[in-house]
Image (cartoon, rainbow, N blue to C red):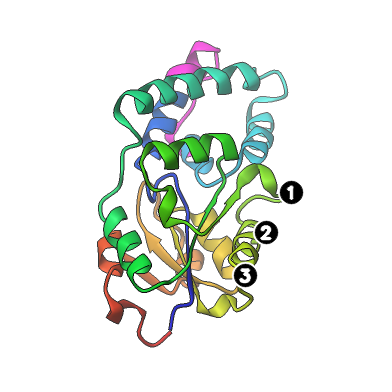
Amino acid sequence: MIRAAIFDMDGLLFDTERLYCEAWRIFAPEAGYPVTDELVYSFIGRNHRDTLEMVNTCFGPGFPYANFARKTRNWINEIMAANGPPEKAGVRFILEFLRSRAIPVALATSTSEDTARWMIERAGLTHFFTAFAFGNEVSRGKPDPEIFNLALSRLGLFSPEFCVVFEDSPAGLSAAHAAGMKGVFVKDLIEPDATVLSRIWKRIDSLEVAALPEFYYNM
């Protein structure tokens, strides 16, 4: 039976990947760097450091990343400050279900601590989480398993095979597999390739599907 659950944040709890992608489409061309959807989607699930490395590889070190990141963050924060982070379907169902069964829950997000804590608090979800692991706390981002290992250790558990990870990105699903955890794919913007999909435990259309005891049978 499940002993812990770990959740990604952007694209899973909140419908924010669309905001990030839209920000790239708006602000990158302003700086003289037109982007494709394929490039923007490749950043999904990555932390700030890894995204910077990918941008430098694509555009060269002249890309004004610090200024760009500040503009996009301010634009997105204004939207969320006014309306709150846009919740995905089933978020409160699954979190309430897990809490009712005393199953500890961790957040493991590539987003930095300050931003992620603000989003979780703004949405009123902080009390659902026992532990947190943030992108700025690890030296290797997803698809490396470091952030999931950190989250599990902060839950005080050491049995990854009984931990379910809910993810929307190929990088996150690969990290869950590398950590020895059971990955559940909830599609947002990206369809992982066949190799990634062959390693997941289950695929669902909404987090509501996982708010049932029978979902966790035969772990």
Q: In this view, does 44 lie to the left or right of 140?
A: left
Q: Residue 139 carries which label?
A: 1
Q: Residue 146 carries which label?
A: 2
Label 2 crowding class (10 Å Cα cut-off): few <14, some 14-19, many 20+? Answer: many
- The N terminus lies in quadrant: bottom left
Q: Nearer the viewer, mark 2 or mark 3?
A: 3
Q: Is residue 28 magenta?
A: yes
Secondary element at image label 1: loop
> Residue at coordinates 33% horizontally, 69% vertically from top-left?
100
In space, the residues marked 1 and 3 are separated at their CA atoms by 21 Å
> Residue at coordinates 49% horizontally, 71% vertically from top-left?
4
Query: Residue under circle 3?
Result: 156
Q: Is residue 33 magenta?
A: yes
Q: Is residue 162 left or right of residue 216?
A: right
First in sequence: mark 1 vs mark 2: 1
First in sequence: mark 2 vs mark 3: 2
Q: Can residue 112 be seen in this view?
A: no
- The residue range painted magenta reads 26-38
The type of residue carrying mark 3 is Gly
